[in-house]
Image (cartoon, grey):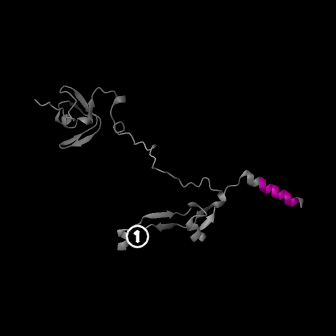
Amino acid sequence: MAPTLKRKNQNPYGPDERVRAWQSFGHATGTVRADDVLRGDDPIVVEHHPWFEHVDTPTAEAKNVWSEMPPPPDHRDHPGVDVQTSSLANVPPERLVRATSTFWQNEGFAPGSLGEKAGLPPTGRGWGIAVGQVVEISHPLVRRHPESFEFMRRTVTLADVERLAAEDTKTEGV
């Protein structure tokens, strides 16, 4: 005699148990709203049992969208990933310039690709610099269009005041 296999998605609720929908959902013949209470042997419960829980489940333990969401993947231990940032935080202020025009550099198609060979119109894929964006003075667009960039104004610091006061003192003594 062959063993009887239990269905994986079998309804865990008994016929006399009362269950509550923990979230609204639609099915073939209608809609079940959150907190609707049905019997465990109701055809909707039998067919859609993951959407139900016991009526006496405490609120703190009740299912919700967030408790049913799988945990996010852990990306910390992937040796092949090299994340780099392009930060201007460590660039000296005298090397920073601000764009006075907007630029768009179309990247087009990959060299040798079917798109390039077919001579198709630009893809719209690329990168840009917007008016007001701060970049380092060595950026290729600054070199090509220096008239479209200006040196940044900066706030006065105590060091500036002291330096200029010392220069004034030197000139007065002469």
> Disc 1 marks which residue?
122
Q: Is residue 85 above or below residue 131?
A: above
The spot of residue 153 in percent (x, y) is 65, 60
The spot of residue 106 in percent (x, y) is 45, 68
162 left or right of 115?
right
Q: Is residue 12 above or below residue 33?
A: above
Give yes or no for residue 82 being in the magenta stretch.
no
- In terms of depth relative to the viewer, which is nearer, 94 or 84? 84
SS type, badge 1: loop
Residue 160, image quadrant = bottom right
Whether residue 120 is visible here, answered yes or no, is: no
Q: Is residue 121 above or below residue 65?
A: below
Q: Amino acid at mark 1?
A: Pro
Residue beneath the point at 56% across and 66% down: 140
Give yes or no for residue 170 being in the magenta stretch.
yes
Residue beneath the point at 12% across and 31% down: 2
Q: Which residues are magenta?
A: 162-172
Secondary structure of the magenta portion, mostly?
A: helix
Residue 136, image quadrant = bottom right
